[in-house]
Structure formats: C-alpha cells, structure tokens
Image (spheres, rainbow, N blue to C red):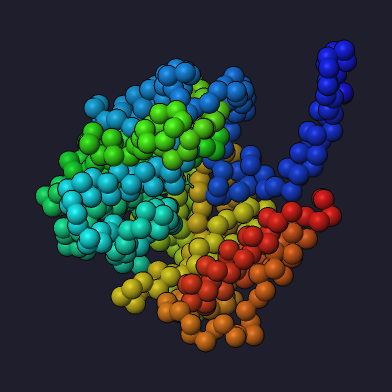
C-alpha cells in the first residue's frame, strides 16, 4: 500500500509502508526466537500474548513524547511515580525514592555515580583514589561503571563451590576510600544470593553505602515465597544498611527492553544521581538519569505491564517459574556427570561438570550446551575464570528459566538428559583450567588466534557464531587480549553490509 497524502500539498512525500515493514520482517527472520521458551537467556517470555500486545499499544500511545521534561509531559512523571510506588511496595521501602532507567546497566551506573559523588562531597579536596568493593560474581555493569566514572574496583574472590562468599571477605575491605559495596540478589552467573544482611550491617557501621543488585531478582524474589518457592534470605530495603537497589522491569517484570527501577533508601544518595546545569546558554538542564532527550515508550510499556499484572499476576507467573526451575534442577541432579553450582535462589541455574565422578563419566558443560542446542534449546555458556587468589570458578552453562519454560518442560528435560548422553566422557577444550590472568603471555603471535574478522564473516554467513570456540578462547587468552578480540569481532559483525542484505 502506498501512503499518499493529498497530492496538492506542496512537496508531498509518498512512501511504501508495506515494503519497509516487509524488509524489517526479513531482518527479523535472522533472529533467535524471542517467544516459546527455546532460548534460555536474554528473553523473559511471560507467555501472555495479550500482555505483549498491551505493552505495544502503551508504547505507541507515547511514541512522540520526550521523557526529557516531565513538566511539559506530566504523563512521564505520573507513570514513573506509579512504578516507583510499585517498587516501594514490593521491595519494602515505603520511603524510598528513585527513578525508572533504561535498564540494569544504567541503574547500576547511577548507583555508583551517586555513591561516588556523595563520597567526594565528604572528602573535599581529597586526591586519594576511591573504589567500589564487589564480589567476583557481581555484574559486569559495575566494572563498566567504574571504568566510566574513573573509580577503582576491588574484586573479592568467591568460593567456586558456592558461587558466593562469607560477608567478612567483603566487609574487611571497607575503609575510608570505599565509595560503595555491592551485593547481588541473586548474581547473574550462578543465581546465588550474597549475604546481604551481614554485608549491609557492616557497611552501615563503616559508613559505606551498600547497593543490592537485584536487577534480575527484583521482580521475582518478592513473589518467590508466595509462589511456593520456599524461603528467600533477607535481601531488600527492609535490611538495615541497604542504601540502594536495582530491579529490572525488562527482565522478570516482563516489560519490553528498556526499563529498570533504581530505588534509594537515602535521599542524599538519590539527589547525587542527578545532573543539573545552568552554566550554558540553553534550557536549564536537570537529568535524573544518563540520557537527555529520551523515549517514553519503554516506560509506558513497563507501566502498562506492571499495572495490568499487579502483585497477584506476578505471583501467578512466578508459580510457573518455581515449578519449571525445580524440574530443571531435579533433571540436572539426575544427570551423571553434571551438577548445579551452589544453591541458587530463584529461576537461574548454572550447571558445571561433576568432578566427583570419574573423567569418563563427566560431562563438559560447553559440549553439553552444544548438544542441547542441536536438540532445539539454546543455553548460555560461561567461561571458567581464575580469581585473584588463584581459585578457578569452573566453566558453566547458564539457564534462565521463564514462565514459558513450563510449557516446553518435557521436551527441554529430554534435551538436557539426551544432550548429556551425547557428549559424556568427551573432554572440552581447555577443560583442565582457567585463563592466564596476566597480559602478554606471548599469545599475540599464537598461530591459533583466530582472526576476529574471519569469525564475524563466518557468523554472518552461517547465521550463528560458534560460541563454544569463543568461550574456549576466552579461557585461554589473557583477558586484555580476549576483550580486544571481542571488540574487533562485534565491530566487524555490525559494520554495514556492502551487499545491502
Ligand atoms: C541483567 C543484569 C544487569 C545488567 O542489566 P542490563 O539490563 O542488561 O543492562 C545487572 N545485574 C544483574 C544481576 C543482571 O542480571
């Protein structure tokens, strides 16, 4: 169909709506399926088509709004107010204040920025470097925040068997130079909850703010108990000493990508997240979050989804998570050669090789992920990591269970068990250990080092990347080298395609 405004309008423009959309549909044909429970990471499918439709309509309703200025567009403040109120309720901080951000990374970044600025205010004229203290399992977003905000990171090793650490390992590192300590509820890699109560208490004692990263748990742990998932150790704003918390609406909030909640128990910290400027000749600037002009579409979509579901809706969806997660854990427990790492609380599970069985019966988690993929389900590989004191967090395969997992459970469990049978006893590359931590181990000239451009070309042509090979490389190469390789790879992968495909 050709959209044709009145041709008597001077300079009228016509365009081919259907052709443009057909091309987008063709592009989308290259994507992993976002619905149906075949991909156990990245996507959080409620299984409720009407909810997705509601989100789309809400987004469309505010398509032309600029979230930069809630005084001009009060709907932005109203929706955000409702979401923050919802956050106060489920995270149990009746007096908490905060914002909706574009995602977990922005929430974490702003929590770090707020803590840094309060620290600076309390240390006027200090030239000492300040740092954030965090467990090895804390999300990469905190490393990114420290990088952007020029802070040091003090990364504390975790116990490779449990995926977490004794609180004292973290709290003994708190001192005058600490701007923030971070704990996760739960941490993404293994789904394990850190000792929030003990860390927050010690942080309060030391006068250090404590951020609980509940980006992935923040809209599932509040409902876990009521959904029959069993007790969750204290982790939210009720815990004394917790000063801020992040909870992603675009994960287990089931909103489309682009929304996260960031709440502060402490108003001084909350104010420190803002940026305001009157020292330029344009409009007065006051930004609560990172962006300037910003879309209100994901805010409206998240608002609509949470408003429609309410706490009862989340409890009902969490029930499906509880059932499916228990079934997945039970299945892994029954597979010879594999085991679940630590004791996860919530719908995330990391699976590692069972070192207690003879090598001939062990299952390499990355070969397993490949075998399960051939059986129709995409799991997420995570490389082994050597920590600063030398212990190795083993390579693992991560599963993010979602409500739709419950609908494909029989098929999934069969693929998990059958995939293990396919590769049992086979040794994965580099299975013996972790990566070299130091830079420049003479790898630069290694003949095995793949050309990132070649990897990108192959990924484009085959429509998928050989992730097992990439994980093997990450385990083998010095970290700086593998990080540079990833940059080169993605830059190549996303460059405009000369054939215009
Ligand atoms: C997903 C996640 C983040 C980062 O969130 P994005 O929305 O991907 O930016 C931070 N922390 C945890 C624990 C997460 O799971």
Residue located at (84% from left, 33% from top): 19
Residue 58 position within the rendered picture, expressed as x and y whole percent measured from the top left: 57, 22
Residue located at (16% from left, 58% from top): 176
Between 481 and 136, the residue placed more toward the observer is 481
Query: How many numbered callouts?
Result: 0
Between 170 and 151, the residue placed more toward the observer is 151
Between 157 and 417, the residue placed more toward the observer is 157
Residue 337 position within the rendered picture, expressed as x and y whole percent measured from the top left: 49, 69
Answer left or right for 490 relative to 305.
Answer: right
Q: Quadrant of residue 418?
A: bottom right
Residue located at (55% from left, 57% from top): 380
Note whether residue 406 is visible: no
Asked if 440 appears above or below 5 in the picture, the reply is below
Q: In which quarter of the image is residue 342?
A: bottom left
Answer left or right for 372 relative to 233.
Answer: right
Note whether residue 388 is visible: yes
Residue located at (49% from left, 27% from top): 67
């Amino acid at each position: 169909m050709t959209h044709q405004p009145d041709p008597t309008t001077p300079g009228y423009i016509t365009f081919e709506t259907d052709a443009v959309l057909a091309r987008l549909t063709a592009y989308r044909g290259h994507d992993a399926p976002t619905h149906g429970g075949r991909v156990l990471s990245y996507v959080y499918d409620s299984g409720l088509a009407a909810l997705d439709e509601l989100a789309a309509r809400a987004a469309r309703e505010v398509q032309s709004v600029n979230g930069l200025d809630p005084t001009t567009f009060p709907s932005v403040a109203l929706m955000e107010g409702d979401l923050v109120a919802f956050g106060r309720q489920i995270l149990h901080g009746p007096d908490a204040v905060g914002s909706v951000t574009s995602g977990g990374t922005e929430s974490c970044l702003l929590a770090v920025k707020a803590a840094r600025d309060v620290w600076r205010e309390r240390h006027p004229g200090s030239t000492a470097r300040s740092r954030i203290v965090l467990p090895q399992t804390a999300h990469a977003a905190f490393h990114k925040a420290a990088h952007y905000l020029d802070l040091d990171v003090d990364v504390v090793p975790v116990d490779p068997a449990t995926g977490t650490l004794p609180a004292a390992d973290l709290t003994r590192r708190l001192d005058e130079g600490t701007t923030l300590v971070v704990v996760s509820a739960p941490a993404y890699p293994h789904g394990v909850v850190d000792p929030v109560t003990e860390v927050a208490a010690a942080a309060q004692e030391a006068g250090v703010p404590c951020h609980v990263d509940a980006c992935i748990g923040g809209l599932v742990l509040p409902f876990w108990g009521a959904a029959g998932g069993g007790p969750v150790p204290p982790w939210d704003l009720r815990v004394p000493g917790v000063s801020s918390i992040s909870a992603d609406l675009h994960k287990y909030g089931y909103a489309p990508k682009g929304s996260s909640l960031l709440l502060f128990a402490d108003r001084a910290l909350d104010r420190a997240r803002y940026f305001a400027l009157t020292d330029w000749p344009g409009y007065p600037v006051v930004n609560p979050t990172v962006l300037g002009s910003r879309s209100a579409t994901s805010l409206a979509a998240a608002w609509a989804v949470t408003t429609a579901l309410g706490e009862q809706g989340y409890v009902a969806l969490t029930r499906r998570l509880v059932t499916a997660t228990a079934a997945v854990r039970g299945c892994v427990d029954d597979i010879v050669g594999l085991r679940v790492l630590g004791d996860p609380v919530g719908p995330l599970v990391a699976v590692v090789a069972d070192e207690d069985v003879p090598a001939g019966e062990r299952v390499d988690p990355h070969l397993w992920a490949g075998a399960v993929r051939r059986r129709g389900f995409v799991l997420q590989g995570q490389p082994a990591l050597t920590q600063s004191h030398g212990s190795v967090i083993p390579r693992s395969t991560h599963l993010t269970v979602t409500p739709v997992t419950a609908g494909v459970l029989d098929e999934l469990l069969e693929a998990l068990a059958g995939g293990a049978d396919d590769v049992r006893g086979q040794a994965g590359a580099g299975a013996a250990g972790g990566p070299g931590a130091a830079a420049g181990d003479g790898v630069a000239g290694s003949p095995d080092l793949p050309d990132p451009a070649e990897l990108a070309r192959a990924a484009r042509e085959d429509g998928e990347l050989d992730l097992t090979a990439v994980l093997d490389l990450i385990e083998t190469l010095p970290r700086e080298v593998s990080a540079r390789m990833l940059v080169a790879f993605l830059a190549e992968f996303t460059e405009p395609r000369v054939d215009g495909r």
